[in-house]
Amino acid sequence: MRGTVRTAAGALAAAVVAAASAPAAAEALLDGTTPMICAATRTAVCQREGECVQGSAESVNLPVLWRVDVASKSVDSLSRGEERASTVLSAQVHAEAIVVQGAENGLGWSLSVDRSTGAMVLAGGREQGFIAFGTCAAS
């Protein structure tokens, strides 16, 4: 069953990447008024001493897929069996990017999504820092 869940999540992540690969369409839809589905494809965690480890989203306790709704100020995990939510504290829509910031259980995070490509970077931390790269598309 777990392999099926990972396969389904992988297929959905591939669909998000494919949907966001059309730059003109991504720009028109990534305007902050429509919720986004984001998929983390690469991650790294760095310790205070400077040691960094690369891995999957699961390896850094990050959902592979999540829904970002700027209008309702919410970020929700779409990973099966995992009910996690985070409140958006700040969101700004710029000509080139959507920047969203929040906090969850004392951990601050910031998400930047390129409006023309859907490319995203998520970074945050408290005792250690993490960064995730991936893609977002309008849902």
Image (tube, helix red, strand yellow):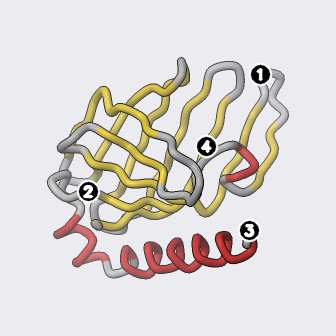
Amino acid type for the residue under numbered disc 2: Pro
Q: Is residue 92 left or right of residue 131?
A: left
- Front disc: 3 or 4: 3
Amino acid type for the residue under numbered disc 3: Arg
| Residue 139 x %, y % | 29, 67
| Residue designated by label 3 | 2
| Residue designated by label 4 | 131
The span from disc 1 to disc 3 (Cα, nearest Å) is 33 Å
The span from disc 3 to disc 4 (Cα, nearest Å) is 25 Å
| Residue designated by label 1 | 48
**Which of the two residues, 36 or 99, is positioned nearer the viewer here?**
36
- Front disc: 1 or 3: 3
Q: Residue at x 55, y 23 (%)?
A: 107
Q: Which mark is residue 35?
A: 2
Q: Residue at x 54, y 38 (%)?
A: 123
Element class at badge 1: loop
Q: Residue at x 27, y 71 (%)?
A: 26
Give the mark nearer the N terminus: 1 vs 3.
Answer: 3
| Residue 15 x %, y % | 46, 79
